[in-house]
Image: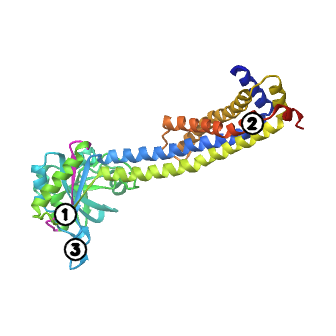
């Protein structure tokens, strides 16, 4: 018996039991739709994290003081004073794998402009900080090296600071704001960046010359950190090795001594967040994949019922010359058609559900083509796997016993 006739017989059998065929497909439909939607949510979250990290500077390197033991007690890294201006200057002058570098010191307090106030931190940085963090001055200008040399009381503020200190919409450039009773003249406003993947407001920022913060706000001679940017993302590891060598030399550390500084890169953050996201995506996909297994069991159950109901038909067909392989193929085709049809419907529902989640919940969604093909392939294999055994049972029936079956 040729394949065309077997296909017609399978279609006729399904058409005669439309409701039962649809209910059998339902498990496959739900499973495929769930897998596609869950993977789309997971991949969307991963893409969003990668985009946020890219906006922060994918080749950014952060250097902070390291924790130390004093009298058997481990100290808080933030209280350490191991990074000096001399370290920053050595890195600036000697490194060959860095495109930009900036010191960092910070002071928290209350910003005041007229009758408005807002709690914030003033970050003391260098002029290259904008390049490292991929920030842009939208209105006004960035402070200059001359401002740094003179410890000028000038600052650049973010959109959140503008909205809270100047709610009337007036131009803040040239205005005076006070921070812990010290006046700062606003010379520029940064372009808005919104919240990052960790929920931090990237616009609640005040940048001032690092010399101003060190001398006028904190009265310290050490740095709280150094931000740098590698020439390219691929050169980040070379840059960190070079930084480590220079700092160890400056700090006169022996080969047996531990580093008194900590170097972190965006690659570490990206790897950590991506591994977490991949784990959650896999977990969601596995949970959704259970629906496919349940759907497959449903196919096996219905095919068993179908074989039992059509035992006399099978006996008659075999008595007039149908081979066991023809009977096997007929029922296997029915199972595969149920799974493939359910898979197609599931793909459409999964894509639609992903779009609804994006539109209603405003979650980042990204449907990768491989997830659709994988879901479709799995449901097809499920149909073959769970449909084969009932089909094999039908093919192994004895024609005489099948005809006698009541």
Separation of residues labelled 2 and 1 (CA atoms): 68 Å
Residue 263, horizontal then vertical, whole percent: 24, 57
Quarter of the view holding residue 404: top right
User: Which stretch appears magenta?
Assistant: 219-233
The answer to which of marks 2 and 3 sits earlier in the sequence is: 2
Q: Mark 2 points at which residue?
A: 21
User: Residue beneath label 3, please?
Assistant: 69
CB atoms at circles 2 and 3 under 8 Å apart?
no
- What SS does tag 1 mark? loop
Disc 1 designates what residue? 259
Disc 2 versus disc 3: nearer the observer: 2
- Between the residue at mark 3 and the residue at mark 1, the CA separation in whole angstroms equals 12 Å
**Residue 116: % across, % down:** 34, 61
Is 149 left, or right, of 205 in this rendering? Answer: left
Residue 123: horizontal and vertical position, in percent? 24, 58
Above/below status of 277 relative to 306: below
Residue at 60% x, 37% y is: 381
Comes first in the chain, label 3 or label 1: 3
Against 262, residue 145 (above or below) is above
């Amino acid at each position: 018996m040729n394949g065309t006739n077997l296909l017609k017989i399978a279609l006729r059998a399904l058409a005669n039991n439309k409701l039962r065929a649809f209910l059998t497909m339902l498990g496959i439909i739900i499973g495929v739709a769930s897998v596609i939607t869950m993977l789309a949510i997971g991949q969307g979250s991963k893409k969003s994290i990668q985009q946020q990290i890219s906006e922060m500077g994918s080749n950014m390197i952060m250097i902070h003081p390291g924790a130390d033991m004093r009298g058997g007690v481990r100290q808080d890294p933030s209280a350490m004073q191991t990074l000096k201006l001399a370290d920053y200057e050595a890195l600036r002058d000697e490194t060959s794998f860095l495109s930009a570098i900036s010191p960092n010191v910070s002071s928290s307090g209350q910003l005041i402009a007229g009758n408005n106030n807002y709690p914030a931190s003033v970050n003391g940085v260098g002029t290259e900080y904008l390049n490292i963090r991929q920030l842009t001055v939208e209105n006004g200008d960035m402070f200059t090296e001359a401002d740094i040399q003179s410890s000028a009381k000038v600052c650049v503020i973010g959109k959140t600071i503008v909205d809270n200190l100047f709610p009337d919409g007036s131009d803040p450039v040239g205005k005076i704001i006070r921070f812990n009773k010290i006046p700062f003249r606003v010379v520029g406003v940064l372009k808005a960046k919104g919240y990052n993947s960790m929920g931090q407001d990237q616009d609640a920022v005040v940048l001032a010359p690092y010399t101003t913060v060190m001398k006028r706000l904190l009265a310290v001679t050490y740095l709280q950190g150094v931000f740098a940017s590698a020439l390219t993302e691929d050169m980040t590891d070379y840059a960190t090795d070079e930084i480590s060598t220079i700092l160890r030399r400056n700090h006169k550390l022996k080969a047996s001594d531990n580093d008194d500084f900590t170097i972190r890169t965006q690659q570490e953050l990206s790897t950590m967040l991506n591994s977490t996201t991949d784990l959650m995506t896999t977990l969601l996909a596995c949970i959704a994949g259970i629906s496919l297994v349940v759907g497959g069991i449903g196919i096996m159950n219905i095919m068993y019922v179908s074989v039992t109901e059509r035992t006399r038909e099978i006996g008659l067909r075999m008595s007039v010359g149908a081979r066991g392989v023809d009977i096997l193929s007929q029922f296997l085709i029915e199972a595969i058609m149920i799974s493939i049809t359910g898979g197609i419907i599931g793909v459409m529902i999964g894509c639609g559900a992903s779009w609804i989640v994006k539109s209603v919940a405003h979650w980042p969604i990204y449907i990768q083509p491989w997830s659709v093909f994988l879901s479709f392939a799995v449901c097809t294999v499920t149909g073959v796997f769970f449909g084969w055994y009932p089909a094999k049972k039908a093919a192994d029936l004895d024609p005489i016993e099948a005809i006698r079956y009541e």
